[in-house]
């Protein structure tokens, strides 16, 4: 029962994170209209994401799952990657600009206990560029 | 040419002038070398004359281990390599300001005058500098960037409140826990990663590689910022070195007593597997196991325990068993290879069920390993509150961990006389261990686990060997501080993180790393890694489960960053610090009451601390050497010859041990092979009447990548071997001190 309550709490937190990011996107407009820069996104990805993630089409999973084609994919479904229980029990969404942004801005906040929680998250100013870069890799 | 390079060249010129002037003072006729049948002696000169304070290395491949004996030249350039086993040797000169001389063949009983080669330029000379000289070129976030305000603030994670805390993670309690950053292997980029356009991408890939990838990624994940943080700093560092940036300082040559050092290097095990510690004797009586085998502990890497016979120069291995082989998890579970190593590809080179961390020896020569014997989720019933054990009734230890858990060890004992193993199933985890000097032969252990499992444990080994009853022989206590100030341990204490009731005592959740018994009063002392570092005193009292009381002392500035510790015969605690210090804590200097409200925070006795700077260059803008000393051992019995109670820290960035004598550091350097990095020290007296030859310190290399150590016939100074046959295995180094540089 306690565990179920925890899961519900985490799921509620996650939805709250997504809602907050969605609100930001509504106010700020979609990435493209603010000129998200794929090149800058690639550089930011190298600085902040490549430590754990591969991005090439056939690259192996690393400490984190391979991110080729992540947008529009259901969370927690990369073949061969062993997700944390915390992530699997909370991440019931598909990856789109909103969910991905919420996630990379604060992984420990969105899914407490996830393996990615060691990373503080990316800066607001980099998030749209990174998402644009990820969107280009499919 | 940037300012730093200009300074470096100016300094190099100054060093050459200084060395030149030393030479002009020491150009005396070499004489007085008595070369016995097992010695090699002679004089080292260069085109400037006799070379003082350089090393002469005699190495052979004829024995059962890698074997090199290394001495230092005296003021007149004279040397004597003593007591060499019968073999054919290669002989050469290494020194600061030089490049290696041509190796010549030499046999014991012969004299050779060696020609030292002056380095043609600073770049060539610097290839022989210890890692710290290169590591100090790394750029650290400025103090003004702290405290961290997160990715949308100043970029630094909010976890980091101070620059010191950041440094602690890139040094001993992070990267420097396992690696000597700055040695050849780490400051250059392996071919496997050299195709990346970006050095940041190359470092990102590199940090994922091999069985250490998980730990490296987790550590670096904490240090990432929008501008790349420490990942980008490493890339910038290795890029600048590749472009030719050189250390801004040059290391001094050995002087004074440092020239009396005789270093004998052997190896054991193999290049794929690392060690943490070794045991050579009973610390309380260092004549135990005289001339006997040395035993190593291999932590996560393998269950094969290496044994060195230093008399016959042979090495062997013995499998350290686990009691429950069917379900005891392996280290491989927690350390999978998910990206290829430039050395070992995708091979899962770490695979150990025993996970033996540290050994120690008793007066009978039995070797006690802190090692895993069973699954962490299989706690004995006697650990729970219904146990007859008083410790369990008061503080049950029933947490179950699924899978591999780093500090879920117990005690495994190897008796060399019977060649049998015994298992002592402890309820508490074990890490470091040391004996008390008491009738019960009590063995004290820390857990290195914070939180609920932060206890100090003990085994009455006399009772254990008499009865074989592991349960009855053990006990443990949480760390309870007398915060209500009534002078005794009370039950019903405050728990960590809960509101403090001033009428109660308080439990502190500090895991203990190093642990030692105080000859002054029988108290137990330990180090705790939580930044900025703490030491803990435990007074066991008459019935430890009920009476043990803890005291907490936080390392004050300028110190921070602790790992191991030891204690001298007067009860003074000695610790090595990331801040670039050896520090001491003398409880006798404390002026105020050490209990009462707030005692759990560790601020009761700043006046008890003293700090002694370690040698070596600093990072730009940071005070204190860029050293990250891992452990410290006190030479209570004057085994080395620098005096009883000499504190000796491992100089992990300096290929050294650092002995503190009269407030000054004596640098005990291992110049060959470069990359020596130790995690523990043991000292043994083989022959109490044998003078310097009958005693010495035994140290194994403890970096998790022995293959980063300078290889056999290395392709460049300090470089790893190119093939498995030439890569370095872990080293076993014997440090001995003669009365003078030509002593025999």
Image (cartoon, rainbow, N blue to C red):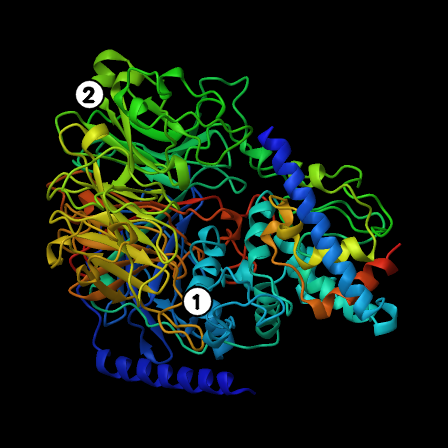
Q: Residue at x 18, y 43 (%)?
A: B694
* Chain containing the residue with disc 1: B
The reply, left or right, for residue B471 in relation to residue A104 is left
Crowd around label 2: few <14 · some 14–19 · many ≥20 (10 Å): some
**Residue B580 in view:** yes
Horizontal and vertical percent for residue B596? Answer: 19, 50
Horizontal and vertical percent for residue A114? Answer: 63, 44
The reply, left or right, for residue A124 in relation to residue B411 is right
**Foreground mark, 1 or 2?**
1
Q: Quadrant of residue B549?
A: top left
The reply, left or right, for residue B573 in relation to residue B263 is left
Q: How many marks?
A: 2
Q: Residue at x 39, y 52 (%)?
A: B530
B154, B715: nearer the viewer: B154
What label sits on residue B410 in the rendered view?
Answer: none
Q: Name the image quarter holding the N terminus of chain B.
A: bottom right
Q: Could you say whether the residue bearing mark 1 is in a helix, strand or loop?
A: loop
Residue of label 1: B162
A60, B345: nearer the viewer: A60
Q: Residue at x 82, y 53 (%)?
A: A56
Crowd around label 1: few <14 · some 14–19 · many ≥20 (10 Å): some
B260, B455: nearer the viewer: B455
Residue of label 2: B462
**Residue B338 in view:** no
| B89 is higher (above) or lower (below) than B31 | above
Q: Quadrant of residue B668?
A: bottom left
Q: Which numbered disc flags the more N-terminal residue, 1 or 2? A: 1
Q: Could you say whether the residue bearing mark 2 is in a helix, strand or loop?
A: helix
């Amino acid at each position: 029962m306690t565990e179920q309550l925890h899961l519900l709490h985490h799921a509620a937190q996650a939805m709250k994170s997504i809602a907050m990011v969605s609100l930001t996107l509504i106010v700020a407009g979609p990435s493209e209209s603010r000129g998200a820069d794929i090149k800058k996104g690639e550089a930011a990805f190298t600085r902040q994401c490549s430590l754990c993630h591969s991005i090439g089409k056939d690259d192996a999973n690393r400490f984190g799952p391979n991110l080729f084609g992540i947008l529009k994919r259901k969370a927690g479904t990369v073949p061969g990657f062993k997700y944390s229980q915390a992530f699997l029990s909370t991440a019931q969404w598909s990856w789109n600009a909103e969910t991905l942004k919420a996630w990379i801005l604060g992984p420990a906040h969105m899914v407490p206990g996830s393996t990615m929680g060691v990373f503080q998250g990316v800066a607001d100013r980099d998030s749209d560029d990174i998402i644009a870069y990820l969107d280009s890799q499919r | 040419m940037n300012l730093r390079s200009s300074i470096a060249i100016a300094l190099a010129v100054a060093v050459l002038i200084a060395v030149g002037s030393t030479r002009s003072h020491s150009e005396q006729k070499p004489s007085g070398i008595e070369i016995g049948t097992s010695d090699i002696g002679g004089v080292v000169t260069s085109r400037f004359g006799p070379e003082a304070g350089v090393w002469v290395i005699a190495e052979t491949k004829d024995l059962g281990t890698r074997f090199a004996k290394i001495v230092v030249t005296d003021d007149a350039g004279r040397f004597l390599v003593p007591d060499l086993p019968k073999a054919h040797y290669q002989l050469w000169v290494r020194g600061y300001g030089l490049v290696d001389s041509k190796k010549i063949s030499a046999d014991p009983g012969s004299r050779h005058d060696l020609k030292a080669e002056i380095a043609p330029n600073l770049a060539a000379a610097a290839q022989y500098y210890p890692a710290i000289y290169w590591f100090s070129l790394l750029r650290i976030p400025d103090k003004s960037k702290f405290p961290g305000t997160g990715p949308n603030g100043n970029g630094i994670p909010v976890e980091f409140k101070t620059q010191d805390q950041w440094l602690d993670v890139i040094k001993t309690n992070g990267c420097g826990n396992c690696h000597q950053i700055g040695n050849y292997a780490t400051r250059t980029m392996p071919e496997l990663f050299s195709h990346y356009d970006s050095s940041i991408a190359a470092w990102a890939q590199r940090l994922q590689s091999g069985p250490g990838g998980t730990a490296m990624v987790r550590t670096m994940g904490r240090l990432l910022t929008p501008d790349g943080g420490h990942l980008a700093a490493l890339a910038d560092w290795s890029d600048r070195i590749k472009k030719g940036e050189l250390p801004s300082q040059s290391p001094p040559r050995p002087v004074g007593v440092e020239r009396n050092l005789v270093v004998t290097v052997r190896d054991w095990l193999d290049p794929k597997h690392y060690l943490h510690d070794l045991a050579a004797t009973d610390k309380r009586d260092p004549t135990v196991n005289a001339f006997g085998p040395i035993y190593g502990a291999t932590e996560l890497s393998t269950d094969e325990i290496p044994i060195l016979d230093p008399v016959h120069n042979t090495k062997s291995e013995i499998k350290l068993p686990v009691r429950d082989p069917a379900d005891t998890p392996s280290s491989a579970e927690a350390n999978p290879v998910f990206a290829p190593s430039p050395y070992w590809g995708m091979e899962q080179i770490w695979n150990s069920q025993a996970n033996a961390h540290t050994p120690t020896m008793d007066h009978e020569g039995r070797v006690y390993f802190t090692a895993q014997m069973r699954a962490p989720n299989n706690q004995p019933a006697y650990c729970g509150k219904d146990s007859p054990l008083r410790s369990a009734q008061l503080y049950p230890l029933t947490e179950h961990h699924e899978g591999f858990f780093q500090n879920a060890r117990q005690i495994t004992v190897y008796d060399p006389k019977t060649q049998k193993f015994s298992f002592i199933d402890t309820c508490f985890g074990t890490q470091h261990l040391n004996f008390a000097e008491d009738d019960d032969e009590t063995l004290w252990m820390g857990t290195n686990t914070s939180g609920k499992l932060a206890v100090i444990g003990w085994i009455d080994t006399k009772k254990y060997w008499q009865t074989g009853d592991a349960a009855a022989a053990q006990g443990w206590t949480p760390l309870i501080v007398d915060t209500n100030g009534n002078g005794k341990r009370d039950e019903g204490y405050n728990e960590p993180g809960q509101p403090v009731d001033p009428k109660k005592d308080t439990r502190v959740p500090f895991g203990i790393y190093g642990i030692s018994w105080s000859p002054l009063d029988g108290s137990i002392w330990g180090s705790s890694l939580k930044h900025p570092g703490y030491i803990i005193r435990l007074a066991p009292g008459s019935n430890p489960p009920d009476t043990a009381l803890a005291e907490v002392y936080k390392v004050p500035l300028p110190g921070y960053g602790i790992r191991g510790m030891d204690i001298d015969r007067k009860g003074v605690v000695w610790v090595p610090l990331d801040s670039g210090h050896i520090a001491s804590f003398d409880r006798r200097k404390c002026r105020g009451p050490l209990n009462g409200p707030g005692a759990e925070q560790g601020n009761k006795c700043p006046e008890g601390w003293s700090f002694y700077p370690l040698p070596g260059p600093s990072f730009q803008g940071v005070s204190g050497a860029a050293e990250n000393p891992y452990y410290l051992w006190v030479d209570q019995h004057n085994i080395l010859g620098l005096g009883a109670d000499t504190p000796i820290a491992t100089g992990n960035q300096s290929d050294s041990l650092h002995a503190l004598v009269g407030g000054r550091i004596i640098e005990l350097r291992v110049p060959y092979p470069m990359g020596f990095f130790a995690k523990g020290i043991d000292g043994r007296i083989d022959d109490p009447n044998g003078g310097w030859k009958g005693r010495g310190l035994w140290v194994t290399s403890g970096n998790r990548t022995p293959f980063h150590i300078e290889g056999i016939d290395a392709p460049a100074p300090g470089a790893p071997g190119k093939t498995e046959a030439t890569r370095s295995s872990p080293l076993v180094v014997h440090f001995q001190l003669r009365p003078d540089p030509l002593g025999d």
